[in-house]
Amino acid sequence: MSTRISQPDNVAMKGGYWLATKGTMDVIAAAAPLVMDALDCMDTEAADSPFCLTDMGCADGGSSMHLVRKVVQTVRRGSPDREISVVYTDQPRNNYNALFRLLHSVDESSVQSYFEEFQRLYVLASGTSFYEQLVPNRSLDFGFSCTAMHWLHSKPSDISEHVHAVGATGDELLTFKRQAAVDWETILLHRAAELKDGGRLVLVNFCRDAEGRHLGNTTGVNMFDTFNQLWCSMLSEGEITQAEYVSMTLPQYYNTLEEFGAPFEDSGSAVSRAGLTLEHAQTKVVECPFRAEFAQHGDAAQFARDYVPTLRSWSESTFHGALSASRSEEDRRRLVDDFYGAYRALVEDNPAQHRMDYVHAYLTIAKSSS
Amino acid sequence: MSTRISQPDNVAMKGGYWLATKGTMDVIAAAAPLVMDALDCMDTEAADSPFCLTDMGCADGGSSMHLVRKVVQTVRRGSPDREISVVYTDQPRNNYNALFRLLHSVDESSVQSYFEEFQRLYVLASGTSFYEQLVPNRSLDFGFSCTAMHWLHSKPSDISEHVHAVGATGDELLTFKRQAAVDWETILLHRAAELKDGGRLVLVNFCRDAEGRHLGNTTGVNMFDTFNQLWCSMLSEGEITQAEYVSMTLPQYYNTLEEFGAPFEDSGSAVSRAGLTLEHAQTKVVECPFRAEFAQHGDAAQFARDYVPTLRSWSESTFHGALSASRSEEDRRRLVDDFYGAYRALVEDNPAQHRMDYVHAYLTIAKSSS
């Protein structure tokens, strides 16, 4: 459920690991003022129950480590003895071993855990999806999520002429838009049940901004169009079948601010009746760290080598899954390797056109008595 | 912190995996009546807060899966709508990936998760040691642990002529006994802080019973004496140094029922003042599943092949750690392989003498207003 980056699985990923982490860290750093503002609005000195924080879509916890430290420090400033629970959540296949090793400082790491810095702090993990309730009713003070909620609960349909909803049209686009609205409401209603009165959410989600920009589509070519063109080439060259081409549809949708805000507009909506209000909404673009690094070193081959693996890290399983199960595993792997190899060649040939700037909506949501 | 068995790390372990799991499952099955009795004594219908259960030293959660299911069923029988949290805890190096994959049924498994069977059930994991507080003050209803608390917080000293406290004498024995008493008190005081009034613990810990029996020492040879003799042979053959021989000391202690009961005897003790009372204490022997399997198949080589890897699974890191850091990793691995190879040869030569029966204390502890 997370596009945040965890421990590298292989050496190829390692070159880009810190840059990809830097990207997420930059996005989370951009959210920090909103988080501090949200805490300011809360009565964190109410010490009748532990302060509970969730990080939904946590990956290995590295990119939010410093933000969580700041939240704990802030709560403790007002209420030095208050117990605090931090609940990290992600999907069941997440690398929880990496999370606990990082939190408990088992290995050397450039990310310093806050765990030993505080007393009366309980750190837990959950493998339950944010499409379900994660913690008991009215037990949550502050919920955070970054770069996770663009993953739909399930793929509503294939997109016949593209790989992503940003390239969908007509009824297919409508199907995705509707699914995304239902999913967004589901996410919010579960959070409404979890939140105490006066609690807050800060959700940092991929979006389409007022200028139509989105992840990988700011200046230069549209990353998802590149995905689609390369996948299309493999179809026209007979490498993959039409069914495989169509089946490659990322189960994602990037809401606009209007779409994120819709459930809050109507005071009779389920979300409003559950006590949620939208306190703050804005979009921000965070520069692609690979691109910034390339501006320093100017080596197109190195840029391509660092950049493409991070795209691969969150898209590979969907490409792999689109290939027919009747193929050998070796064949499927070769085709996926070919695909990203072709992407790398494109980047190396024309590096100026490629970048994956992050475009996020930063949302603060409050829970009042319902 | 757990001697319970998680996913096998290698093929060699696989043969013994299910048998080792069966052993722990048998021990937990023997604890089930105590757990049900403890729940009977509790007011589980008090629905003002979620019912919280911990499983301390959970490994991958497989061996306690059915017990946790029964606890949830029992709580829900009295209070169908009550929210329930299950918190799995182990040390930071535990295989949490295996835990979450098993709980959320990601892979095929012979162990069926209860997770999908219930609503309003929150399953979490913690990588914090049971020598620390695991959950907030007065939030715990029922704490369970099986085969974990014989691991001392740290090794109090080396044992000069044996590898385990069961073979220690004089001052060395006294040092271990004292450390174990301090550690047991630490464990109990943290649990006392976590427990709600009326809450219960069922702790199933390795022990020495009234007949002096303990893990691997019921009939036949004493497993720990065998460990020691083989390690001694490697010393006399010049394979390891005197310092390495001495450094191999398992940081474990097996309390007697009297030692487990001591903090509860004195009404002025810290444990008594914290509100804990010992409601039930007994010892039980559970037969070595490898030995039972051998009685069926009669193949000494297979017995040795299945049996020794399970001993290795919980002792290898200590043997490895006793070897000088100045040796190459290859050399250390070879020596450890030689050690278990020699153990296997002993078992194959004289299988009738070898078995690792489990000898546990089964303790029920209650928390009253302190």
Image (cartoon, coloured by chain):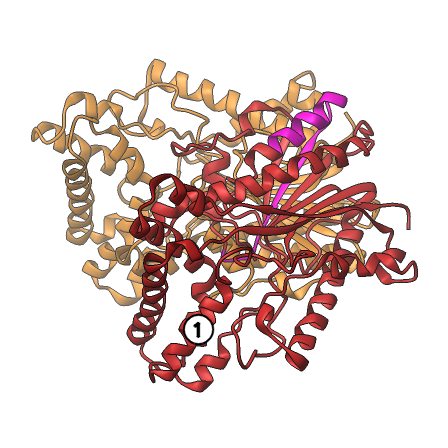
Chain colours: A orange, B red
* Residue nearer the viewer, A179 or B138: B138
Describe residue A248's horizontal placement relative to residue A102 as left or right: left
The residue under the point 71% across, 49% down is B135
Q: Quadrant of the N terminus of chain B?
A: bottom right
The residue under the point 46% across, 63% down is B315
| Crowding near the residue tagged with mark 1, few <14, some 14–19, many ≥20 C-alpha atoms within 10 Å | some
Q: Which residue is mark 1?
A: B229
Q: Quadrant of residue B27?
A: top right
* Chain on which label 1 sits: B
What's the residue type where badge 1 is placed?
Gln
Q: Position of residue B320 (x, y in %)?
A: 41, 71
Q: Is residue A73 visible?
A: yes
Q: Is residue A109 visible?
A: no
Q: Position of residue B39 (x, y in %)?
A: 75, 33
The residue under the point 42% across, 24% down is A154
Magenta segment: B68-93
* Residue nearer the viewer, A314 or B369: B369
Does A274 appear above or below B7? above
Determine whether the residue tagged by mark 1 lies in a helix, strand or loop.
Answer: helix
> Does the magenta portion include B91?
yes
Does B315 appear above or below A253? below
